[in-house]
Image: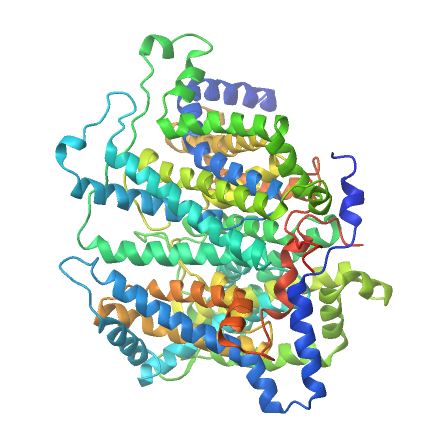
C-alpha cells in the first residue's frame, strides 16, 4: 500500500463541480455587459446575506438561551435590546467609534497577512503565533531603547516586531516550499511554540521586577502617540495605510502577480519561469510580518505592557476576516471594521442586556458557516450571478497530502 | 560530576527518573488519554480522506455538554436514581452526561461531514468554523449559567490498584500507571488497540484505507465512498467527544472555559508522529504526555544535586513546547518522513453523477 503512494499522489486532482459552476456564472455575466454596481453587488451580496442571517440566528440563540440565566424566563425582546446595546457601544457613540478603529486595526493587518497567504494558496493558521511573537519582541525592543527619543524608539520597536513576525512566518513557509510539510499543521505547531516562548519570556527574562503578576515593564518611549479620540493611536493609521499598499503590491506589481499565479497553479507558474518555492517562502514571511505588525501596534498602542496571560483572538479572527473579505484587501478592511464593531460593542451588550460577549465568537462562526454553505444559500434565495463562495480559498486542504513543491 | 560531566549527568538524571517513575508514568498516562483519543479521531477520519482540525472544538463542546447535562440530570433525577457503583464510581447522571457528550460530538462531526463531503467545502475552513463555534457556544452558555453555579455530576473514579500489586518490583508501577485510571481512560486504551485491529485486519479497515488512498478506485470496486466517509467522520466525532468527556467528567469534575487547552491540536500532532496508525498515535501521545509530566516533576521535585540545578535552569515551558518542536522536525522530514493518506483533504465527487 505504501509503495504505490507516490504515483497516486502524482495523479491530477479531480476538479470540483462547485468551482466549475461558480466560474461559469462569472464568465457568462461580463458578456452581458455587467456594470460596476453589478460587480460590487455580486461580490457583496453573499457576505451581506451571511451577516444578516447570522444576526438572525444570533437573535434566536439569545431568545432560546435567555431562560438559562438564573431567575429568568424566555424573553422575546432581549435580542433587540442586545443588538441595541451592541450598536450604542460601537457605532452609536463617539468613544465607541474610536474603539471600533482600535479593534479593527490589528484585524486589518493580520487579516491582510492571512489573505495574502490565501492568494498564494497558503492557509496561514499561524497568525496567532506571529501576532504574539511580534508583540513580545516589540516590547523587548522597546525595553532595549527605553531611554531614547520616541522618534527612535517607536520605529525600532515596530521594525523589531515586524521582523519577529516575519521569522515566525518564514519557518512554515520554508518548510512548505522545501519539504512539503503542510503549512496548516506547521503553523498550528508554531502557534503553540510561540505561546510557550512568550510565557517563558514574560515569566523569566522580560518580567518586571517586584511585580506580583508576571508582566513586562511598560514600553515607555515606544508608546504610540494618540492622535484622536480617547485612545485612537497612530497604529490605526499604519493599518489603514497597509490596505492600499498590499492592494498595489498584489494587483499592480510583478511580485503580486507572481504570488497570485503560484496560488492559482504552482506548476503553471513554474513553467512560466517563476520560482514557486521562493515565492511561497516570501509570501509566508510577508504574511507573518503583517501579523507581527498587528501584534506590535496592539501592544505599543493599546496595552503598553504585556502580561503573561495576554489573551487575544486576533490571530483566529483574522482568518474569518480574510475569508469574509474574500482575500481582497478592501474586502478585508470592510470585514475587519465589521468585526471591530462587534468586538467594540460586545462589552456594553453584556453589561446592558446581560448577553455574554462570547456571542460575538458565535456570530463569527455562523457567518463563516453561511459563507461555506453558500451553494445552499444561493439555491434557497435564488441568487443567480452572485459570486458564490470563498473565492480562491476553496482548495486549501487539497494540497494536504501532497509532496514538496518543485 | 566535574570529571565526567556528561556521564555523571546521565546517571543522576536516570536516578531521578527512576525515583519519580511512579508519579511520572501515572501522570503521563492520565494526560495522554485526551491526546490519544484526539489522535484516534484524526486517524479514523483522515484514513478515509477527511481532514478534521475541528476536533479541538469537538473536545471542548463535548466536555461542556457532558458536564452540563450531568449537572441537569443531578438536578432533575430523584435521589434514589443517583447511587454510584463502588467500582469506577459510575452513576446514572454521569452516564447521561457521557451519552450527551458523545451525541454532541457526533452532531458536530456530522456538520463537518455535511460541509466537506456533500457540499465539498474546504475541510480546513470547516474545521476552523467548528473550533470558533465551540469556543463561542461553550463560552456563551458557560457565562450565562455561571450565575446559578450549577453542580456537576461529579466524575468517574479511578480503579484503585491494591498496594501490594502496585508495590510489585519492576512491573508494579506500570500496572499502577495503566490501571489506576477511570473507566474512560481504560476504555480509551482498549479502543486504540481495537481500532488498530479493525483498521488493518477487517473489511471496514481495508475499505477505509482504500477510500483514503484512492477513492475513485474504491468506488469502482463497489464501495460507497460518500457513505463510508460520513460514517467514519461521525464515528471519529464520537471518539473525540470521549476525550472531551474525559476532561470534564474524569480528569476533573468541572468545566472551565477553554478546558480543551490544545489537546485536540496536540492530538493532531500525535497522529502525524504516529504515522496515521492508532498504536503509533498512542505511543506519540504517551511520549508527548511524558514530556509534560517530566517537566512537572522537575518543577515540583527536582533532585538535590548538580543535575537538579541544571534541570531547574530549563524553563518548564520548554517541555510544553517540545511535542510541537518534535512534530515540526518530523514533518520537515529530518527524522523519518510521515506521509498522509494520498486522498487526505480532497473532496470526492462521483463520476457517474455528472
Q: Residue at x 76, y 47 (%)?
A: A9
Residue B149 lies left or right of residue A396; in this view the side is left
Q: Nearer the viewer, residue A120 or B352?
A: B352
Kindly tell me whether residue A307 is visible in this rendering.
no
> Residue A298's x, y, as percent?
45, 69
> According to the image, what is the colour scheme of the structure?
rainbow
B233 versus B200 height, above or below: below
In the drawing, does residue A216 fall left or right of residue A273?
left
Q: At 36% from the left edge and 68% from the top edge, which residue is drawn?
A: A57
State the image quarter where residue B27 is shown.
Answer: top left
Q: Nearer the viewer, residue A285 or B247?
A: B247
Query: Would residue B7 be found to the left or right of residue B171 on screen?
Result: right
Q: Position of residue A267 (x, y in %)?
A: 81, 60
Classify residue A256 as left or right of residue B248.
Answer: right
- The x, y position of residue A255, in whole percent, is 75, 73
Q: What residue do we see at 24% from left, 36% from top?
A: B93
Viewer can see residue A1: yes
Q: Quadrant of the N terminus of chain A?
A: top right
Residue at 29% x, 56% y is B141
Decide which of A227, B350 is in the foreground and name it.
Answer: B350
Pick whichever, A6 or A308, lies toward us.
Answer: A6
Where A255 sits versus B117, above or below?
A: below
Image spot of residue A400 (x, y percent)? 66, 51
Asked if residue A44 is positioned above or below residue A9 in the image, the reply reads below
| Total numbered labels placed on residues in the image | 0
Quarter placement of the C terminus of chain A: bottom right
Amino acid at each position: 500500500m505504501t509503495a504505490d503512494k507516490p504515483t497516486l499522489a502524482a495523479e491530477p486532482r479531480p476538479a470540483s463541480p462547485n468551482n466549475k459552476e461558480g466560474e461559469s456564472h462569472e464568465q457568462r455575466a461580463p458578456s452581458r455587459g455587467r456594470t460596476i454596481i453589478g460587480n460590487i453587488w455580486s461580490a457583496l451580496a453573499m457576505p451581506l446575506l451571511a451577516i444578516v442571517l447570522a444576526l438572525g440566528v444570533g437573535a434566536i440563540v439569545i431568545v432560546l438561551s435567555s431562560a438559562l440565566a438564573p431567575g429568568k424566563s424566555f424573553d422575546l425582546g432581549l435580542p433587540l435590546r442586545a443588538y441595541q446595546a451592541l450598536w450604542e457601544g460601537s457605532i452609536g457613540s463617539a468613544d465607541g467609534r474610536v474603539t471600533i478603529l482600535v479593534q479593527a486595526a490589528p484585524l486589518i493587518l493580520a487579516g491582510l497577512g492571512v489573505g495574502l497567504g490565501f492568494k498564494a494558496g497558503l492557509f496561514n493558521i499561524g497568525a496567532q503565533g506571529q501576532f504574539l511573537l511580534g508583540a513580545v519582541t516589540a516590547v523587548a525592543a522597546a525595553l532595549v531603547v527605553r531611554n531614547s527619543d520616541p522618534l527612535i524608539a517607536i520605529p525600532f520597536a515596530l521594525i523589531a516586531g515586524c521582523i519577529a513576525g516575519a521569522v515566525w512566518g518564514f519557518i512554515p513557509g520554508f518548510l512548505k516550499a522545501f519539504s512539503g510539510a503542510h503549512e496548516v499543521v506547521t503553523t498550528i505547531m508554531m502557534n503553540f511554540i510561540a505561546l510557550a516562548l512568550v510565557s517563558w519570556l514574560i515569566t523569566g527574562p522580560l518580567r518586571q521586577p517586584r511585580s506580583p503578576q508576571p508582566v513586562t515593564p511598560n514600553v515607555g518611549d515606544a508608546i504610540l502617540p494618540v492622535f484622536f479620540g480617547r485612545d485612537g493611536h497612530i497604529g490605526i493609521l499604519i493599518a489603514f495605510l497597509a490596505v492600499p499598499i498590499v492592494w498595489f503590491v498584489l494587483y499592480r506589481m510583478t511580485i503580486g502577480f507572481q504570488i497570485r499565479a503560484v496560488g492559482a497553479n504552482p506548476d503553471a507558474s513554474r513553467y512560466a519561469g517563476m520560482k514557486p518555492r521562493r515565492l511561497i517562502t516570501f509570501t509566508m514571511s510577508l504574511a507573518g510580518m503583517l501579523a507581527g505588525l498587528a501584534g506590535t501596534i496592539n501592544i505599543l498602542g493599546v496595552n503598553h505592557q504585556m502580561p503573561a496571560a495576554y489573551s487575544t483572538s486576533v490571530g483566529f479572527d483574522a482568518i474569518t476576516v480574510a475569508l469574509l473579505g474574500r482575500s481582497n484587501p478592501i474586502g478585508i478592511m470592510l470585514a475587519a471594521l465589521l468585526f471591530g464593531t462587534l468586538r467594540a460593542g460586545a462589552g456594553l451588550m453584556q453589561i446592558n442586556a446581560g448577553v455574554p460577549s462570547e456571542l460575538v465568537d458565535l456570530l463569527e462562526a455562523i457567518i463563516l458557516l453561511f459563507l461555506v454553505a453558500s451553494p445552499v444559500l444561493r439555491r434557497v434565495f435564488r441568487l443567480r450571478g452572485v459570486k458564490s463562495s470563498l473565492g480562491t480559498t476553496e482548495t486549501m486542504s487539497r494540497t494536504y497530502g501532497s509532496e514538496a513543491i518543485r | 560530576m566535574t570529571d565526567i560531566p556528561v556521564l555523571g549527568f546521565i546517571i543522576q538524571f536516570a536516578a531521578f527518573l527512576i525515583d519519580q517513575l511512579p508519579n511520572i508514568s501515572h501522570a503521563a498516562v492520565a494526560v495522554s488519554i485526551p491526546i490519544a483519543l484526539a489522535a484516534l479521531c484524526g486517524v479514523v477520519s483522515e484514513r478515509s480522506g477527511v481532514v478534521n482540525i475541528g476536533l479541538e472544538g469537538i473536545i471542548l463542546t463535548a466536555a461542556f455538554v457532558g458536564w452540563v447535562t450531568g449537572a441537569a440530570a443531578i438536578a432533575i433525577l430523584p435521589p434514589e436514581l443517583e447511587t454510584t457503583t463502588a467500582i469506577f464510581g459510575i452513576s446514572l447522571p454521569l452516564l447521561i452526561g457521557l451519552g450527551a457528550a458523545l451525541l454532541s460530538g457526533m452532531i458536530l462531526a456530522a456538520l463537518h461531514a455535511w460541509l466537506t463531503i456533500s457540499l465539498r467545502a474546504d475541510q480546513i475552513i470547516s474545521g476552523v468554523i467548528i473550533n470558533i463555534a465551540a469556543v463561542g457556544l461553550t463560552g456563551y452558555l458557560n457565562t450565562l449559567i455561571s450565575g446559578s453555579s450549577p453542580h456537576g455530576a461529579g466524575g468517574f473514579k479511578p480503579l484503585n490498584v491494591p498496594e501490594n500489586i502496585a508495590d510489585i518490583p519492576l512491573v508494579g508501577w506500570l500496572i499502577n500507571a495503566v490501571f489506576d485510571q477511570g473507566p474512560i481512560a481504560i476504555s480509551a486504551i482498549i479502543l486504540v488497540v481495537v481500532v488498530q485491529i479493525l483498521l488493518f485486519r477487517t473489511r471496514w479497515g481495508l475499505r477505509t484505507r482504500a477510500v483514503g488512498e484512492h477513492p475513485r478506485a474504491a468506488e469502482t470496486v463497489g464501495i460507497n465512498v460518500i457513505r463510508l466517509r460520513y460514517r467514519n467522520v461521525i464515528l471519529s466525532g464520537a471518539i473525540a467527544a470521549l476525550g472531551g468527556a474525559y476532561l470534564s467528567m474524569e480528569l476533573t469534575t468541572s468545566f472551565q472555559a477553554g478546558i480543551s487547552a490544545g489537546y485536540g491540536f496536540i492530538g493532531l500532532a500525535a497522529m502525524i508522529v504516529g504515522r496515521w496508525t492508532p498504536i503509533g498515535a498512542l505511543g506519540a501521545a504517551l511520549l508527548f504526555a511524558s514530556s509534560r509530566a517530566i517537566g512537572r516533576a522537575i518543577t515540583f521535585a527536582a533532585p538535590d544535586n548538580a543535575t537538579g540545578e541544571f534541570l531547574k535552569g530549563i524553563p518548564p515551558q520548554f517541555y510544553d513546547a517540545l511535542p510541537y518542536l518534535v512534530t515540526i522536525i518530523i514533518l520537515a522530514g529530518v527524522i523519518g518522513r510521515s506521509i498522509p493518506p494520498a486522498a487526505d483533504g480532497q473532496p470526492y465527487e462521483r463520476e457517474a453523477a455528472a
